[in-house]
Amino acid sequence: MRHIRRLVLAVSVVTGSFLGSLGQSQGVDLTGAWVTNPSECRNVFIRKGKANQLTFAPMSEVHGGGFIVEADRLIGRSATCTIKSRKDDGERVNILAGCATDIMLSSVQFDLKVVDQNKITRLFPGMEDMEIHYYRCSF
C-alpha cells in the first residue's frame, strides 16, 4: 500500500509540473483566439457544434492570419501543433512544438514577445526586421 501511495504521489508531481509548464501557471496566459487584425475576429473565428467549440470560419484566410491556443496545442488554419516545451520569462515566451499538416510533420519554434495580455508579437530569430503582431479576440 505504501508503494502505491508513493507511485501516485510521484505521478501527480510529474504530471502537475508538466501540465503546469504548458498552462497558465507560468505567468502569461496565451489561451484563446489570436488574429493579425483585431477588427476581423468574427470573420476569422466562429463557434461551432453543441460544445460551442472555437474554430476557423469559412474563408477565414481572406481576413488575415490567426491561430487558437489551447492548454497543450496551437491550432492554425493548415496545421495543428502539440506543445513539447515552453519557456516563459514574463516578457518573452519561447515554445517548441511538433506540428502536423496534411502532408508533413515538423518541429517549429515560436518566439513570442508579450506586449500586454491581449497583444503579442511573433519574432523570427535571425530575421531582425521580421515580426507579426497578434491580438487576442474577445467573444
Image (spheres, rainbow, N blue to C red):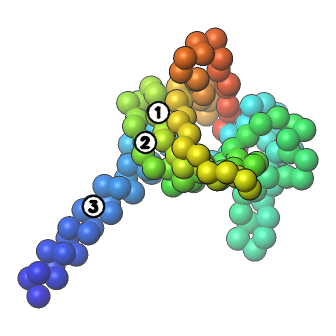
Q: Secondary structure at mark 1?
A: strand
Displayed quadrant of residue 9: bottom left
Residue tagged 3? 14
- In this view, the residue in front, 117 or 133, is 133
Q: In the rendered view, tell whether residue 18 sits above or below residue 113.
A: below
Residue tagged 1? 93
Q: Residue at x 41, y 30 (%)?
A: 90
Q: Mark 3 belongs to which amino acid?
A: Val
Is disc 3 surrounded by few (<14), some (14 to 19) or many (20+) residues within 10 Å? Answer: few
Displayed quadrant of residue 43: top right
Percent across and percent down for residue 98 are: 54, 49
- Cα separation, mark 2 vs mark 1, equals 7 Å
Q: Is residue 40 left or right of residue 68?
A: right
Q: Is residue 56 left or right of residue 131?
A: right
Q: Looking at the rendered structure, which numbered label has been put on residue 86?
A: 2
The quarter of the rendered structure image containing the N terminus is bottom left
Percent across and percent down for residue 31 are: 57, 48
Q: Is residue 139 visible?
A: no
Percent across and percent down for residue 92 are: 46, 27
Residue found farthest to the left: 2
Residue found farthest to the top: 129
- Cα separation, mark 1 vs mark 3, equals 22 Å
Q: Do callouts 2 and 1 mark residues in contact (Cβ within 8 Å)?
A: yes
